[in-house]
Amino acid sequence: MKILEMTATFGNLNRATLRPGEGFTLVSAPNESGKSTWAAFLRAMLYGFPARDRDKEGHLAEKNRYQPWSGAPMEGSLTLTWQGRDITLYRGPKGNTPWGAFSAVYTATGEAVPGLTGENCGETLLEISREVFERTAFVGQGEGSLSPSADLEKRVAALATTGEEEVSFSQVERRLLDWRNRRKVNVKVGLIPQLEGELRETQETISRQGALLEQIQTLTSEKEALEVQKAGLESRLQAHDNARSAQMSQRWAQAQADYDEALEKVESLRKTAGRLPPAEELRQAQGDLSYLRTLNAQLKQADKALPRAKEKAETARKAVKEDPYFGGLEPTQATAQAQKDHGEGEDLAKKRPHPLLLLLVPTAVSVGLAIYMYFSYYSSSWSVLTSLPWWFNLIFWLPPVWIVSLVVILLLLFLRRRKKKKLSSLLSRYGVQNAEDILARATEYAQKATGAQEAGQELQALVTERDKLYDQQSELTVQLLDLVHTFAPEVTTVDGVTAAISRALQQGEAYRMAENSLKNAEKLLSALPAPRSTAAGTIPVPVSAPEGDPEQLSAQLASLTAQLSQISQQAARLQGELHSLGDPAEWEAKHSALTEALELRRGEYDALSHALESLKNADSLLREKFSPAVNERSGHYLALLTGGKYSKASLTRQFQALAQEEGGTAPRSDLSLSGGTTQQLYLAVRLAMCDLALPGEEPCPILLDDVLDPFDDKRARLALSCLLDVAKSRQVLLFTCHSREKEMLKDVPVTVINL
């Protein structure tokens, strides 16, 4: 089988396409560019996702791990050559199942490939199971070592036999061990220990049944003797009970008289107390009266404080309104005006150079002109052409300069005087000496306005509180009068309410005490047993008490009763235990059956032990036939990969690889080798497995994901040479994240793909 083209929307691949060559193909790409994803995609196209693969801690199921990053549905196609014809495989979503749809058609005609389904696709095309594929031709990233596999063992066993690849030694051995362990694992587990335990339990049950019968007979005799003693004690106690009944009848008659008296008193008090409110409501009313007195005191205080608050608020308001600087303005308006005037005052108060200093300008100009004309007069032909003195021209130049300068100085002096006058007017308006004090005036005004506002708020709060107190006083007075009018309609004042509530509480308390007396009398009457002859209207006459202390007799009777109850419980428990054990005849039959079954299982155990020993001998003979082929081929590849340093390799039953140096005396375990050599050893074993265990008519492609990473440059070059030889007979895809492999193969005609 040869791969022609792969198109995938899978993991970080989004409609990506990969076209490997017929022989050796090098796929070079940096990390996280999709190399391992392409490898996983090829395996998923051939074998699908493992059915039992689930998310768990530290592991993400493949069907979830490779969900497309783009959010598109997971799908892909694989075009390959098989049995001389091109076939296109497709997998994609089906309903809510990712990777659930599958189709296999001939690329040229679009006709379905008969017998090829999503379940058997990989095994049909490659003629190997997923387990064998992952342990031979598919070397994932960091997955070079081998693990035990029954399927791979079957394939290897086929090298030495011509039988079918249906079972392996480990499977048969495991099955025979399971059968033998089912009989007996150790002294505690297995059918044989179970039967031995059941046989012991059966023997113990038969012995237990005999002991229970003896105990039940003994308890029955003790119970009969105790019942005779109990009957004598009960007759003597009955005589004491008759005497006590006569005394109780007299006590009942007295209790009945007390009850009648209490009932009459309650009926007489109910006429006056029946229309009174509940005591809790009356006590609540007393609390309301106390609160009403508190309200009256608070109202007096509020009435006294109100005139002072009004006077304070009016004084503060008048002070704000009559303020000489900001009277009537809001604090924010006053602050804004003060800041504005302060800024203007600061600007007017700024010190500037005195205008008279400008006299220096015309003076400097005059001196400069004089010097210039003097030197010009004596250094040029001017003095020859004219007889005028050198300073004559100054008469024309100096007057204009001085006139202009004096005009400017006078103007500046006027403006300076005007600013002083304006600043003086501004400061006098606020009555301050400098502009900074204007802001202080605004702060004082703001404090006055704040004080006036607070005084007004205090006055309003006091008025509101007083009105609230008046409302509460009126409402509470009406409530109290309404309550008292239900039983004392003549009351009209608060003092009358107080007296009426006190009287009502006294009447109610007297009524409740009478009711309590009635309840106590009723409770006592109901607690006493009614005389036996009450229905006939007579009370039994007391009789003399019989001999014996009734308490001692009752204690003896209770003791006998407890002993009888204990014996009855013991007998019932023993009888129940005997009944729960079943029929003794059935137990004897079960004992015989268990003895026969135990002998049978012991014979089976011995037979299985002999079968396991024979199987191991047969497996040793079989391994002597196929192990040399695997070891020889692995050693050949290991010598090529290591440049001849290691010439021998072998594989244990647990699929652990061993290597032996050229000229060495003993093989070395992979655990004692360097990481790079260990990877070379397992790569050699895998290549040997591919040669020996995979079909030859349709060679299975080999996929290697970053397997050369731990190799140094020399051994990497040797590995590439070895893989090129392998690529002559089967397709080889090598994924790498380095550029050295591409550099090593630059002169070799191979397919190089850069992702």
Image: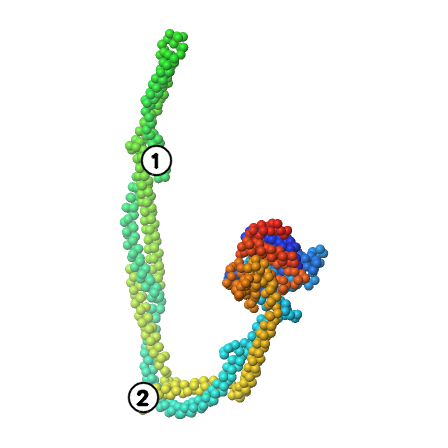
Judge whether 171 appears above or below 357 on screen: below
- Residue 105 placement: quadrant: bottom right
Looking at the rendered structure, the secondary structure element under dot 2 is loop
Q: Residue at point 56% right, 75% down? A: 177
Query: Which of label 2 and label 1 is nearer to you?
Result: 1
Kind of residue at badge 2? Asp
Coloring basis for residues? rainbow
Most extreme residue toward the front is 663
Residue 387: which numbered mark, if any? none
Judge whether 639 appears above or below 579 on screen: above
Residue 101 x/y as whole percent: 64, 59
- Residue 481 placement: quadrant: bottom left
Residue bearing the label numbered 2: 549
Q: Residue at point 34% right, 49% down? A: 464
Name the one closer to the observer, 330 or 231.
231
Kind of residue at badge 1? Ala
Earlier in the chain: of badge 2 and badge 1, it is: 1
Which quadrant would the N terminus be assigned to in this image? bottom right
471 left or right of 110 in image = left
Residue 707 x/y as whole percent: 56, 57
Judge whether 444 appears above or below 371 on screen: below
Q: Residues within 10 Å of mark 2 (few under 14, many from 20)?
A: few
Looking at the rendered structure, the secondary structure element under dot 1 is helix
Residue 338: which numbered mark, if any? 1
